[in-house]
Structures are given as structure tokens and as C-alpha cells.
Amino acid sequence: MVEDNDSDAQLYAAMLQELQADTVDNPTATPTEVERVTSLEPGLAELTDREQTYDAVLLDLNLPDSTGLETVDRVVDADSDVAIVVLTSVGDQQLGTEAVDKGAQDFLIKDHVTPRVLAKTVTYAQTRKAQTKQIERQRNELSVLNWLIRHEIRNDASIILGWASALEADSPSEQRSLDRIEDASNHIVTLTESVGELISTLEDERTELDVVQLGAVLDAEVTHFRENYESASVSLTGDASDASVKANQFLGTVLRNVLLNAVDHNDTNTPSIEIDVHHSTAGDTDAETTTIEGDAEQEYVWVDIADNGPGIPAETKASVIEKAYSGDADGTGIGLYLVNKFMQQYDGEIRIEDNSPRGTVVRLGFVPAVRA
């Protein structure tokens, strides 16, 4: 606790001890040791002392040797792992909010502190800090993965391309095989070049959208899919040639993941995939439009991708678009999670429905960029 006011410091320490002593209302309370200093410099010395670690800091922003947000900056610099709860006066709520933006986990208004509020705030601050550190670790791991993909995998794909280009086919069959090797290698190189941008896009809640020609992207993905999955039957109905939607360069990734999901989880000898493109109009009675703010209806360009697989149980329909879910034994399925993530960024919709007589329909609703 970094607090220069003796009465306030004694009050907060007593509050923490009071709640710990209440074994009826707080039976799971763990012992809390509170060390108190009256200014920032000795507090920083405590935090940088490697023989003593602290879980949380109660930090007054008006100290004899430091005031305002600079106080938060210095604590964060001294110990990036400690949770910080800022103490502010009644008129300093905005300062508390700004302190959170600077790296504190929460703030308390001194006149409104109670034993339970204090204990919960400190506990939640530690939880938030742990979550933040986990996110930072995941981002570091993504950076390593980004480097690995963009360098190691791309280099190997380039080697494959080089060797394939030096080979000469002796028959049309061999030429088709070489063409597929080159196409697949080129596709790998293209993906590795965009993986960094893909990671950045997934991390952002909002991303800049462009006008994208749905028909051209859909045709390219269907063509590529047919070349790689000759045993699957793919049909495309509806007219997407004039459909322009709000999306970005990863629209193909969205469509590709739904198609791959349809064939990867198919239990038939001949997977059948039917793609239908159609537009919704205001006043449709089959749930083709969605009510948004102001009771207005958002019109969509729908891409319905239906398969003849085993279908998805009703109780897991919502789970299949969550990152943690996978129907695979190895638990690695994230395709529909990626689809859902991008559809949220596109301000669109994804719906999982039953196909008839069996299978699943994944419905993607895109916001039209230009009215048809």
C-alpha cells in the first residue's frame, strides 16, 4: 500500500483484516499481508526487491514525491507483473479511468470504499492482470508462429517450386500432377505472405472494410476446391456475379473454411456440397433480414453452403463457432471460429441450420456494398 495518509492506510488495512476474520460470509478468505509505505520511492524499492514479491499495489496518486498519472507509469515500469488498484478522491473519477488506460487494473474512490468492495476489487485486479499477462504471452507466441510460417514454411515451399519447375512431364497425367504441385506451392507462398496481416486482423475488434466482388471470390474458391477434392460434388446456384459486399481480402478464407469443414467432417463416399447465393429484401417473411437499432431491417446477400454429412447436434450448434470447440479427436478444429470472427468484423451473420434429409447448412449473411 502506497498511501501517505495515516488514517486512510489504517482504515484499508483494517478492512482487509475484517473481511478475513469473517469466516461466515467469507469462508474461503486467504491471509493477506499488507506492507505500507508513505511515498513512491520506497514503494518502488519494495517492488524491485527480488527477495520480496507482491500480488497487488494499492496506489494513492497524490503522494509527497509523485502525483497524477506519472505515478502509475513508474509503478508499471518497476514491476510489470503486479496488479495495481488506484485510490482517488471523489472528484478524481476521470483520473482513475485514465489510470486504468495507463496500466492500472482498477480504481477506487476513497469515500466509497467498504471492506467487501476493497477485497473484491483487489481480487479482480489480480485476475485481470493474470489474464492480461496470458494475452501478452499468446501474442508473443503468435509472433513466433508468424515468423516461423513466413520464413521457414515459405522457404520450403519456394524450394518445392524450384524443383518442380525443373521437371519435365512425359505425359498429360504427369503434367497435371506438376501443375498441381506448383499451384499448391504458390498458394502456400501466398498464404505465408498474408499471415501477419491475418493475425493483426483477427486481433482487432474492428477492421477497415472494402467493396469486394463476391462472385469472383466465390468462383475462385469453388474452382480451387474442385481441383483438390475430386471425389466431392459441388454445385453453385444463384447469381453472385453482380453482388458486391462489405468485406476484406480474407473473404476467400471465410468461404474456404466453410467448404473445408463441409468435406472434412463428411462421412459419405461422395460428399455433396450445394452453394446457393440469394439476396434478402425488406419485408421477407423467412427470417432473411435482421432487426437492428431503430427497428430497421438489415438486408443481406446470403451464401448458403449445404452438405450431406452427419449434421451437427442441436446442443452443439452454438459451440461450433467458438474457438475452444472441436468435433475432432485431436481438438484442433478452429475453421468455423475463424469464419465467425470475420463475419462479426464484416457486420454480417452466420447461422447453423439442419439440411434435409441430412447434413448441415452454414448460412453466411453479408452486408451488400451496393444495392442490387
Image (cartoon, rainbow, N blue to C red):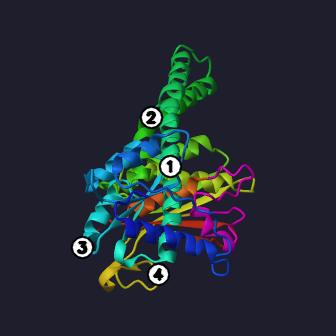
Which residue does the numbered mark 1 point to in the structure image?
133
Which dot marks residue 287? 4
Across and down, in percent, residue 224 comes to: 52, 43
Q: Nearer the viewer, mark 4 or mark 1?
A: 1
Which amino acid, mark 4?
A: Ala
Which residue does the numbered mark 3 point to in the structure image?
91
> Distance from label 1 to label 2 (Cα)?
32 Å
Q: Mainly helix, strand or loop, the magenta region?
A: loop
Please report the residue visible at 51 percent of the width from the left and 34 percent of the height from the top. 144
Q: N-terminal of the two: label 3 or label 2? A: 3
Which amino acid, mark 2?
A: Thr
Residue count near mark 3 (Cα–Cα under 10 Å), binned few <14, some 14–19, many ≥20: few
Q: Nearer the viewer, residue 329 or 47?
A: 47
Asked whether, in this view, residue 32 is left or right of residue 154, the answer is right
> Distance from label 3 to label 2 (Cα)?
55 Å
Local SS, label 3: helix
Q: Which residues are magenta?
A: 307-333
> Distance from label 3 to label 1 (Cα)?
31 Å
Q: N-terminal of the two: label 2 or label 4? A: 2
